[in-house]
Amino acid sequence: MSLRFADIDRIDWDKGGGLVPVIVQNVHNGAVLMLAWMNREALRITLEKKRAVFYSRSKQRLWEKGETSGNYLNVVGIKLDCDADTLLLLAVPAGPTCHTGTLTCFGDEALTDAERLFFIGELEQTIQARIAERPEGSYTARLLAQGQRRIAQKVGEEGVEVALAGAGESDAQLLGESADLLYHLLVLLRSRGLSLQQLVDELRSRHRTLTKS
């Protein structure tokens, strides 16, 4: 459960001299964005505004992330660790988190498998936008205009290409054909009003069944 105003007194403020470290994580892709510090007042304002406010140890004052750049951290939830002396802040960043312009204070490169896989979710969102907007010159829009039967046919064709590549072609060709198959499968799902999350839920349900048997 996310931290509430009533939970502020549960935090061990004395251990850090009135401050606690705050790990900030992108709620969508799991990327660790930055490490900062909060005192009681910074946490109270953060809970109130739903935007991250920290305490600067060098400037000896409160500061709101994005107060000069506009790259705010919109807070989704805050978790307290088992020792009650560290906070995990789950946020949606409004832009690059680091003052250097990188997405995180640890650079732009995805550091975890979850961050890398999140691109599939971004691709799904792009496909959904093409469905809604049907921009001229878009391959996805042209495919959608041909109807679900044609989209399903393309999935079948790409599936055959994947099988052929897997049977005797190079790794690069197999990866390329697999990417084509995944893309067309996402288009088919979205054209039917189905989501990637529903597909993941189906896989998880099957996994639970298998592990119990």
Image (cartoon, helix red, strand yellow):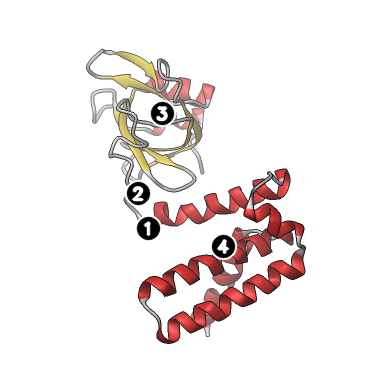
- What residue did someone put label 3 on? 9
Instruction: Check the image and name the residue furthest to the front.
Output: 137
First reached walking from the N terminus: tag 4 or tag 3 = 3
Is 43 drawn above or below residue 58 in the view shown? below
**Quick one: label 2, few (<14), some, or many (20+) residues within 10 Å?**
some
Marks 4 and 2 sit apart, C-alpha to C-alpha, by 21 Å
In percent of the image, x 69 and y 73: which residue is there?
153
Camera sees residue 84: yes
First reached walking from the N terminus: tag 4 or tag 2 = 2
Q: Nearer the viewer, residue 142 or 174?
A: 142
Q: Quadrant of the rendered structure where residue 86 is? A: top left
Is 173 drawn above or below residue 103 in the view shown? below
- What residue did someone put label 2 on? 110
For marks 4 and 3, give the one nearer the viewer.
4
Instruction: State the image coordinates of residue 122 (x, y, percent, origin top left).
Output: 53, 49
Q: Is 132 on the left-hand or right-hand side of 203?
A: right
For marks 4 and 1, give the one nearer the viewer.
4
- What residue did someone put label 4 on? 183
Q: Nearer the viewer, residue 63 or 137?
A: 137
Marks 4 and 3 sit apart, C-alpha to C-alpha, by 49 Å
Q: Is 201 on the left-hand or right-hand side of 12?
A: right
**Quick one: label 4, few (<14), some, or many (20+) residues within 10 Å?**
some
Instruction: State the image coordinates of residue 119 (x, y, percent, origin top left).
Output: 47, 52
**Is disc 2 placed on a helix, strand or loop?**
loop
First reached walking from the N terminus: tag 4 or tag 1 = 1
**Is disc 1 placed on a helix, strand or loop?**
helix
Is 199 drawn above or below residue 84 in the view shown? below
Q: For the residue marked with disc 4, what is the amino acid?
A: Tyr
First reached walking from the N terminus: tag 3 or tag 1 = 3
